[in-house]
Image (spheres, rainbow, N blue to C red):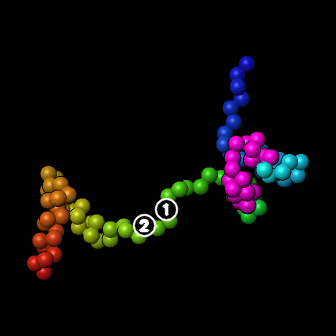
Amino acid sequence: MSWKKVTPMEEIIRFVMLAQSARFTVSELCEQFGISRKTGYKYLARYAAAGWKGLAARSHRPQRFPQRTDAAVEALILAERRLHRTWGPKKLHKVFTRAASSK
């Protein structure tokens, strides 16, 4: 007899359904599912806000990048890199700082 394989999404749905049934407290369900109460309430809030679609996995990618290099500078660096494939970051930095200081 093989073990039944369940996905994390199926477990989250099961957790929300049991919490909605009001037969168990959220604390009991969290303990049974091996998650923190904070995580349990997070899933319940997502379900309340967006229904079943709100329980889908979300990306962990940042929404913005404050230290991101400007697109024009990035294009300039990549163009120079294509011209001089053997140059590394130190050499490119030296060339660009020398060009910037001569202006």
Q: Residue at x 72, y 53 (%)?
A: 37
User: In the drawing, does residue 78 fall left or right of residue 48?
Assistant: left
Q: Is residue 39 magenta?
A: yes
Within 10 Å of disc 2 (Cα), the crowding (few <14, some 14-19, many 20+) is: few
Which residue is the site of mark 1?
Answer: 62
| x then y, percent, for residue 43 | 71, 55
The CA distance from mark 1 to mark 2 is 7 Å
Q: Are marks 1 and 2 in contact (CB under 8 Å)?
A: yes
| x then y, percent, for residue 99 | 13, 73
Within 10 Å of disc 1 (Cα), the crowding (few <14, some 14-19, many 20+) is: few
Vertical side of 68 occupied by 47: above or below:
above
Magenta: main secondary structure: helix
Magenta stretch: give its range.
28-47
Which residue is the site of mark 2?
Answer: 65
| x then y, percent, for residue 21 | 87, 50
Q: Residue at x 76, y 41 (%)?
A: 32
Q: Secondary structure at mark 2?
A: loop
Quadrant placement of the C terminus? bottom left
User: In the drawing, does residue 74 fall left or right of residue 40?
Assistant: left
